[in-house]
Image: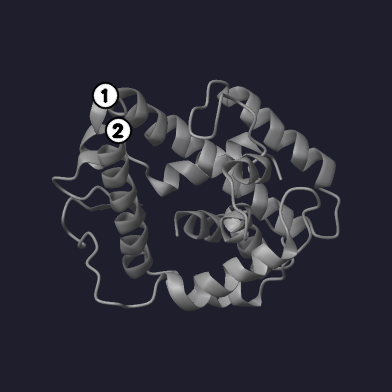
Amino acid sequence: MVHLEVAYRLIGRYEWIENAGDFMAGSVAPNAVHFHDAYSVRLKERSHLWNCGPRWGITLAPDKWKENILTFWEEHKTSQDRDFLAGYCVHLLTDRLNDLRIWSPFRKENMVGEQVEEIYHIYGKEAYGSDQWLYHNCGNSREIFRLLSEGRICPVEGLITQEDMIRQKTYILSEQYKEDGRTFPAAGRGTAYLKGEVRVSPGNHVLFQQVPQFPIASVFHDILHDIAF
């Protein structure tokens, strides 16, 4: 949901965007590899233009990752699928910022010793809960999902398959945020609204106590600085 919210806020910044739905569809596309029948982490490294460490999740050269993204954009910015591919790049830039500000600090501080798997499970659970919280509380979900439903799936040759992107889009629109009785971090519990910016920091949770915040507003400002669409 973070990717969709960041992309939604960026739409109004770029007058050249002709199809906001395509931009939104591109903003989630890199993760469609998770819907591949024979998923492996190598597929994610490829779709995310990541070759910056020994394996995904251990980024040793963040500047190289940024360079890969900007090179990809320069090569594709005149494409007929420009809106979709711009959203694709926004996804990657957002992941890079998440890696720099949240995942890598958390990993270096906590992912050691015999409790690695348990800690990783807690991290994943809290990240999932925050994603669900954002969907239910950001205020833009209805319009975001309308645009996403209208977006085209465009080819990204050599990085991701059309079939996987179709599966992903169907899942996001119909399953991922379906009400099913699960509990998520509640609004008002460690959550602050600052100048229209949503910060998610559930109280008493391991992840959000020990790493910096991931304020969405600052993310899209950094992306505007990183890539001059």
The part of the image, by quadrant, that contains residue 213 is top left
Tell me where residue 15 sits by quadrant. bottom right
| Residue 112 x %, y % | 30, 24
- Amino acid type of the residue that numbered disc 2 sits on in the rendered structure: Val
Q: Residue at x 25, y 28 (%)?
A: 114
- Is the residue under label 2 in contact with that under label 1 (CB below 8 Å)? yes
Secondary structure state at the residue bearing disc 1: helix
Answer left or right for 176 relative to 207: right
Residue at the image position 76 percent from the left and 34 percent from the top: 71
Residue at 45% x, 60% y: name it.
1
Q: Position of residue 155 (x, y in %)?
A: 79, 60
In the foreground, 104 or 135: 104
Residue occupied by mark 2: 116
Q: CA distance from mark 1 to mark 2?
A: 6 Å
Circle 2 — which element?
helix
Badge 2: residue crowd in 10 Å (few <14, some 14–19, many ≥20): few
Q: Is residue 165 visible?
A: yes
- Identify the disc placed on residue 113: 1
Q: Is residue 37 left or right of residue 190?
A: right
* Residue 195 in sight here: no
79 up-or-down from 99: above or below = below
Position of the C terminus by quadrant: top right
Location of residue 40 in the rendering, given as x and y in whole percent from the top left corner: 59, 46
Badge 1: how crowded within 10 Å, few (<14), some, or many (20+)?
few
Residue 61, placed above or below residue 73: above
Q: Name the kind of residue labelled 1 in the image.
A: Gly
Among the 4 quarters of the image, the one containing residue 49: top right
Of residue 71 and residue 143, the one placed in the foreground of this image is 71
Point out residue 170 in the picture as x, y percentages from the top left corner.
57, 75
Residue shown at the point (66%, 38%) measured from the top left: 227
Q: Is residue 117 above or below residue 150?
A: above
